[in-house]
Image (cartoon, grey):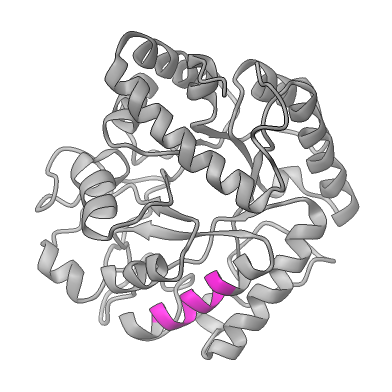
Amino acid sequence: MDRGIRHLAGQRLMLGFEGTRFNPDLETIIQTFQAGGIILFRQNIRSPDQVAALCADAQAFAASCGQPPLFIAVDQEGGVVSRLPKPFTQFGGNPCIRSRKEAQQFARITARELGKAGINMNLAPVMDVVAQKTDSIMQSRAFPGDAKAVAALGTMVIKTLQEGGIMAVAKHFPGIGRTVQDSHYHLPVLDADLAALEASDLIPFEAAVRADVTGIMLSHIICPRLDPQWQASLSVAIARDMIRNVLGFNGLVLTDDLDMKAVDHDMATCMARVLVSEIDLALICHQGPNIKQAFDTLVAMMGSDTTFQALGAASLERIYQYKEKYLAWDRRSKDRR
């Protein structure tokens, strides 16, 4: 198995791009940066046939480069966060789901349509618990009810998506249902200690881990009682210690989009934090210089530090396991570059 540093670095990245067809930018993402995955937005999707062709061409090019298949992700929550336009089935979103049967129906149809389109990972479900008597930023995206209700509905979505061959990602750890600011534009602060989180916010994520969810996405919030310096998405105390050690999660840990304004660090700093926090996939959802800087930083840091190499190899193993499980890939079938 080729554990080359460039491959170790690239597989840790999930990248966005512009366009609705396979293009030179995607070639660079796959061949030069050896990205582990790509993420699709509305700007990349016009129709079922178009997106299926785009995904097929990207996967074929990855194979031609000797790379493992790509994670191809989308945020398809339904409601206000729906990346797939008609004729894909339109749903009202989590606030409209009030029973496990309704959750199952949403996930079953969504899994079928994503699979036909060549998409293999859904950055859903939202597992945030909306606190009562707050103007939560997640009111229009969260399941109704308390933490146990969110856990029940969310785990039904997770199980049904994954039974349908689509990897599910629970978000936004450790929970942003108490926050009122949007991390796309601001840095929210959640002034809650571990006991308060364990009593509510963490319950759905604990349930997601028991449901064998593929991934957990970190939020861009500051939890000063847990880590006064770093966003959850860049925090050793939260991304590594809480998720790996407290929750016992052995799946994929992802950042939210590192291009969001809640992240005020340069990309080199972000990648250093990704490494020390043992995060598997760093999302950079907009085309631009941040992608090259992230890749170059990962290559330099892992190339000069055997500890980072070892952590990178452990992360790559997790990534490979899910690519084998869901993407019909045998890592022994080809020698990679």
Asked if the stretch drawn in magenta spans residue 85, the answer is no
Q: Which residues are magenta?
A: 150-159
Asked if the stretch drawn in magenta spans residue 157, the answer is yes
Residue at x 34% of width, y 25% of height: 310
Residue 112 relative to residue 213: left or right:
right
Identify the image quadrant of residue 323. Answer: top right
| Residue 266 visible in the picture | no
Residue at x 68% of width, y 39% of height: 330
Residue 97 relative to residue 64: left or right:
left
Q: In the displayed structure, would residue 337 be above or below residue 145?
A: above
Relative image position of residue 304 (x, y in whole percent) = 33, 8
Q: Magenta stretch mostly in which secondary structure?
A: helix
Residue 93 relative to residue 51: left or right:
left
Q: In the displayed structure, would residue 224 be above or below residue 284?
A: below
Relative image position of residue 224 (x, y in whole percent) = 12, 49
Q: Residue furthest front?
A: 332
Identify the image quadrant of residue 268. Answer: top left
Q: Nearer the viewer, residue 319 or 36?
A: 319
| Residue 87 visible in the picture | yes
Number of labels in the image equals 0
Q: Nearer the viewer, residue 153 or 40?
A: 153
Q: In the displayed structure, would residue 172 be above or below residue 288?
A: below
Relative image position of residue 255 (x, y in whole percent) = 41, 43
Residue at x 34% of width, y 32% of height: 274
Relative image position of residue 180 (x, y in whole percent) = 30, 62
Q: Nearer the viewer, residue 157 or 260?
A: 157
